């Protein structure tokens, strides 16, 4: 999973480089800048003094000193002044220039805070989207493990409507599975309410639920001879088509089904594993071993990247030895997004994060 969203103190991370949201003097400050300087010790400030400052949008690199990382990449984000003063372009260049420096210094892993989203006031949801956009664009052509460090949960706000939709979707399914319906919906409602209190999104609906409900339209059957009796119900036709398909591929392994689906979708291998946020090495293992068994989140990440409908997703999971079950929220949230035709891995991860679940990928 080349891009990971984690909740951590960036000064604790053992990656090759961490990025500092600095100011143009590079002589330290508050927020993450202050935390990094405190953890690195005076050697960092002494080296920063030799750099002659840094312009907004640019980046400079120093050693990590007492930090567990090798390097610190200092970049200066824009102050948010409403969005009409070139802030977005400057923030994007912070990520691009920092990633370019990380690559130049041979870093295999780098961690970013949400640049400008603290003291500089950049709206956190916009700042997060820009970070993800720029990092995923970089990772299309490069091999690197990149962390986006979410220091406080408010940085991760899925829209209230989306949150409520998912909570209701979980409620409908989780309750069926877990409790005898007569006695405990109030118990479950409490736990959902607790979730809502704990991870209540800030005001404003940043990620309205996307896409109309996912509909499986029967393909036109004009060429089929009209049956003597009443036409077979659409669901039955679909079941037959799926059944034939399933019988044809009953002995297929996970790897074989994955490669077949990539071909059927007209995707390249790289397009598929990049969209699934899976690294090339893991994909090569799956491609070269027809009996390879991936983790459940990896199998789901590929099903999402291929935009498989729910039944095919369940089929692909089954070939990896898993099932989508209603006994855990992770699976139900995945089912929610597939049922609603939303295959955006980032938005799915945001929802998984909001419900304290593991994120998609390896
Ligand atoms: N680890 C990870 N992230 C952190 C940490 C930490 N230890 N401390 C703060 N953050 C997060 C904040 O929650 C915020 O989301 O880093 C993000 C950036 O916030 P700031 O550090 O305030 O940086 P920024 O908004 O870019 O403002 C830069 O603040 O500290 C001064 O000297 C700095 O003048 C500069 C300005």
Image: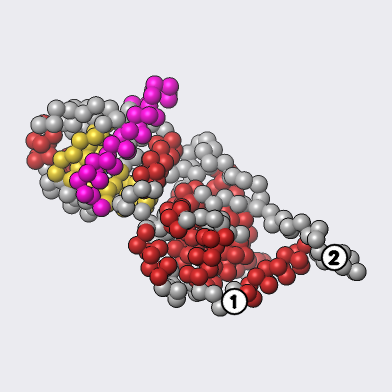
Please state, as top left, top right, bottom left or bottom right, where the N terminus lies in the image: bottom left
Q: x, y percentage for residue 216?
A: 69, 57
Q: Residues within 10 Å of mark 1 (few under 14, many from 20)?
A: few
Residue 260 shows in this picture: yes
The verdict on residue 98 being magenta is yes
Pick the front one: 159 or 285: 285
Tell whether 234 sits left or right of 246. Answer: right
Tell whether 192 sits left or right of 85. Answer: right
Q: CA distance from mark 1 to mark 2?
A: 28 Å
Tell whether 26 sits left or right of 144. Answer: left
The verdict on residue 329 being magenta is no
Q: Which residue is mark 1?
A: 250
* 1 vs 2, front mark: 2
Pick the front one: 34 or 274: 274
Residue 338 sits in quarter: bottom right
Residue 50, labelled with which disc?
A: none
Q: Give, as a single range, the part of the protein colored magenta.
A: 79-108
Q: x, y percentage for residue 91?
A: 35, 32
Q: Say which label, 1 or 2, has the lower sequence index.
A: 2
Q: Residues within 10 Å of mark 2 (few under 14, many from 20)?
A: few
Q: Residue at x 27, y 48 (%)?
A: 110
Q: Which residue is mark 2?
A: 225
Residue at disc 1, secondary structure: loop
Please state, as top left, top right, bottom left or bottom right, where the C terminus lies in the image: bottom left
Residue at disc 2, secondary structure: loop
Residue 187 shows in this picture: no
């Amino acid at each position: 999973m080349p891009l990971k969203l984690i909740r951590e103190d960036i000064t604790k991370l053992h990656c090759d480089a961490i990025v500092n949201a600095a100011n143009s003097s590079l002589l330290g400050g508050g927020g993450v800048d202050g935390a990094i300087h405190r953890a690195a010790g005076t050697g960092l400030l002494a080296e920063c003094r030799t750099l002659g400052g840094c312009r907004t949008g640019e980046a400079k690199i120093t050693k990590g000193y007492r930090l567990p990382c090798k390097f610190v990449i200092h970049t200066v984000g824009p102050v948010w002044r409403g969005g009409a003063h070139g802030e977005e372009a400057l923030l994007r260049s912070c990520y691009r220039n920092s990633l370019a420096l990380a690559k130049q210094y041979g870093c295999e892993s780098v961690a970013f805070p949400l640049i400008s989203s603290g003291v500089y006031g950049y709206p956190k949801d916009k700042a997060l989207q820009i970070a993800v956009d720029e990092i995923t664009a970089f990772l299309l052509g490069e091999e690197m493990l990149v962390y986006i460090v979410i220091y406080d949960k408010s940085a991760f706000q899925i829209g209230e409507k989306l949150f409520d939709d998912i909570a209701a979707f979980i409620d409908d399914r989780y309750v069926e599975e877990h409790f005898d319906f007569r006695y405990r919906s109030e118990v479950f409602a409490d736990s959902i309410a607790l979730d809502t209190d704990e991870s209540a999104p800030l005001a404003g609906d940043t990620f309205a639920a996307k896409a109309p409900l996912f509909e499986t339209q029967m393909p036109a059957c004009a060429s089929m001879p009209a049956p003597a009796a009443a036409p077979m119900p659409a669901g039955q036709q679909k079941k037959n088509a799926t059944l034939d398909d399933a019988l044809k591929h009953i002995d297929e392994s996970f790897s074989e089904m994955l490669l077949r689906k990539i071909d059927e979708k007209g995707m390249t291998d790289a397009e598929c594993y990049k969209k699934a946020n899976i690294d090339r090495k893991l994909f090569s293992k799956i491609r070269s071993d027809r009996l390879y068994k991936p983790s459940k989140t990896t199998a789901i990440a590929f099903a999402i990247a291929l935009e498989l409908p729910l039944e095919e997703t369940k089929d692909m999971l089954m070939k990896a030895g898993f099932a989508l079950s209603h006994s855990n929220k992770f699976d139900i949230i995945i089912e929610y997004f597939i049922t609603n035709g939303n295959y955006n891995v980032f938005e799915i991860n945001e929802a998984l994060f909001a419900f304290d679940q593991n994120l998609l990928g390896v």
